[in-house]
Amino acid sequence: MDIPLELKILNNEMMKFIFKHEKEGKKCTCNLDLDMVVKIYGDEEQQQIEIEQELETIEPGQIYVSGQCIGSGYFSQVFIGTHNNIQVACKRYPMKGDTFYNETANLKLLAPHQSFPTLHGILKLGIFYYIIMELVNGITLENYLNTNPNPVELFSVLRKIVKALVYMHSIGVTHANISTSNILVYRFGNKCRIKFVDFAFSRNNDPHEEIKCKGKIEYIAPELRDKSQTRADLNEKTDVYSFSVVLKKILASNILRDNFLRIDWFSIYSNCSDASQSKRPTFEEILKCLS
Ligand SMILES: Nc1ncnc2c1ncn2[C@@H]1O[C@H](COP(=O)(O)OP(=O)(O)OP(=O)(O)O)[C@@H](O)[C@H]1O
Ligand SMILES: [Mg+2]
């Protein structure tokens, strides 16, 4: 496939398309009419309208958003709210950019699985845009690891994380920001369950898109730290690398290593963190090693 390098608008109808020819490796240009460009790249605005039409828009009168902030990052804050008489998490964005659409589209895709928060809808309140989702009544994995969990429970939490990732990848979603603060652990009866949050940088199968990988540098796979990264570099194997950093933190306390001697923890960790994407296992393979 030719590699797109640049698109320049020439006038209302035409664009100049500059690309690298796949076989000859040369830089080439051609003029395209705008209708054609939309066919090649997809019309981002159109895609966003389609996502929005599929989501429930919550009217300001139907929800109460409190000032109680339960988490914040570079772009967003998460508040507790009440919708249809139940408590919800309200993730507030300053605008409806890519991150807002990534998060809504992929949460919707993942909703049937218990390890992802249910999406209630989207809301515009004042100058802000909100994603309204199930409130997970738990703590981050980072905090959970500080509670000195018992070995059997910790092992089951780890398996649930891997099972959720098997499902996520099976439907073509890459999280792209896996970390111990984006996994929540909560109690359900006398068992622990997990839910992944923060799908702001997540992707589904859209191979043309150029990416900029964000998130905590420690968790980002080496191939994505390079500025020339492309969408093709961001795939399920980059999630496997981030998972290896999560695994390192889980193993740091020695709780699992001392109690699950049958498992070759070192080789799982070293394979998942391999510098070469192709040598990293899939989550299905990781799950088999954890049985
Ligand atoms: N559905 C939820 N239920 C309970 N707590 C949540 C939920 N979503 C997020 N949180 C809490 O809020 C924190 C921040 O949320 P999140 O990770 O989605 O945003 P962020 O890190 O600010 O995102 P970004 O990287 O997009 O700026 C999480 O670490 C978690 O503690
Ligand atoms: Mg986060």
Image: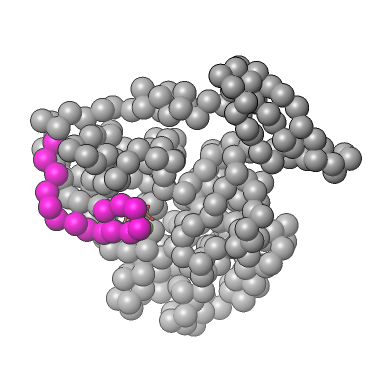
> Could you tell me which residue is drawn at 46 percent across and 49 percent down?
201
> Where in the figure is residue 179, as x and y percent of width and height?
44, 63
* Residue 106 at least partly seen: yes
> Where in the figure is residue 55, as x and y percent of width and height?
33, 28
Q: Nearer the viewer, residue 189 or 107?
A: 107
> Where in the figure is residue 267, as x and y percent of width and height?
65, 72
Is 68 contained in the magenta span? yes
Q: Quadrant of ligand 1?
A: bottom left
- Figure quadrant of the N terminus: top right
> Could you tell me which residue is drawn at 66 percent across and 55 percent down?
228
Q: Residue furthest right?
A: 24
Q: Is residue 257 left or right of residue 199?
A: right
Q: Nearer the viewer, residue 13 or 204?
A: 13
| Quarter location, residue 270 | bottom right
Above or below: residue 16 compared with residue 233: above
Q: Is residue 264 left or right of residue 91?
A: right
* Span highlighted in magenta in the image: 63-77
- Figure quadrant of the C terminus: bottom right
> Could you tell me which residue is drawn at 22 percent across and 39 percent down?
127
Q: Residue furthest front?
A: 11
Q: Is residue 31 left or right of residue 57?
A: right
Is 150 contained in the magenta span? no
* Residue 256 at least partly seen: no
| Quarter location, residue 104 | top left
Secondary structure, magenta segment, majority class: strand
Above or below: residue 171 compared with residue 262: above
The colour scheme used here is one colour
Q: Nearer the viewer, residue 24 or 251?
A: 24
> Could you tell me which residue is drawn at 74 percent across and 37 percent down?
19
> Where in the figure is residue 180, as x and y percent of width and height?
41, 65
